Amino acid sequence: MSAIKDIRINKFELKLADTDDPVAEKTSWDPLKSGGANFKTQDMVETQGRIVIKHSVTAIILYSMFLLPGLGIFFIVSPTLFLEGESGGGSAMALLGALFIGVSLLMLSSKKHMTFDRTLGTYFCGKSYDGSKRGDASRQGRLSDIYALQIISESIRSNNRSYRSYELNLVFRDGERANVMDHGSELEIEASAKQLAAYLDRPLWKAT
């Protein structure tokens, strides 16, 4: 079940290459998330019978580049200026440090770990599945609700250059989708998609 089924897309018609599945026909083949990254921002690992999607080491290093200077500015530079009587400069540095820290923490928390657990039959963001919360399939749900997996690429232009970003989405029986990965490595996203499709025993579709 982990083999990729290519689905050919053009702007007028959906042509099914290796599948005549009616769910594929009512599923959107436009990118689910706008934007993306030109490097691998997420890793997929299997541990203790679970599959976990988390920030890659590269992403953590890049996101932390804002955090360390921010901490230094906020806790060292700003207090030093206040002690020297430079209240205006101290306040400005405190605000700058807080901005750096906030940006870094925002990026680090922008995509929480997503876990797929066959034993519990659930997937969830964060620490655990909360059965009292319903309705947001992008945050948690039952594995039985997942019908297929979908790979879509998107061309992104930034600062007069372009690159491609790749999405891995969950597809539900009604054609609705939830994004689980989005980064710039096609080979890595395909490998992760095959791993997750085999774990879930679900078909894997790729727009070509």
Image (cartoon, grey):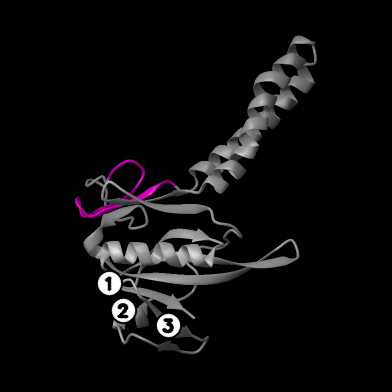
Q: Amino acid at mark 3?
A: Ile
Q: Nearer the viewer, mark 1 or mark 3?
A: 3
Residue 183 placement (x, y as % from top left): 53, 60
Q: Are marks 1 and 3 in contact (CB under 8 Å)?
A: no
What residue is at 22 percent from the left and 63 percent from the top?
A: 144
Q: Quadrant of residue 102?
A: top right
Earlier residue among tags 2 and 1: 2
Residue 82 placement (x, y as % from top left): 74, 14
Q: Amino acid at mark 2?
A: Val
Which residue was labeled with disc 1? 173
SS category of the residue bearing label 3: strand
Residues under labels 3 and 2: Cα distance? 12 Å
Q: Which span of residues is magenta-colored? A: 112-128
Q: Are marks 2 and 1 in contact (CB under 8 Å)?
A: yes
SS category of the residue bearing label 1: loop
Would you say residue 148 sits in the magenta stretch? no
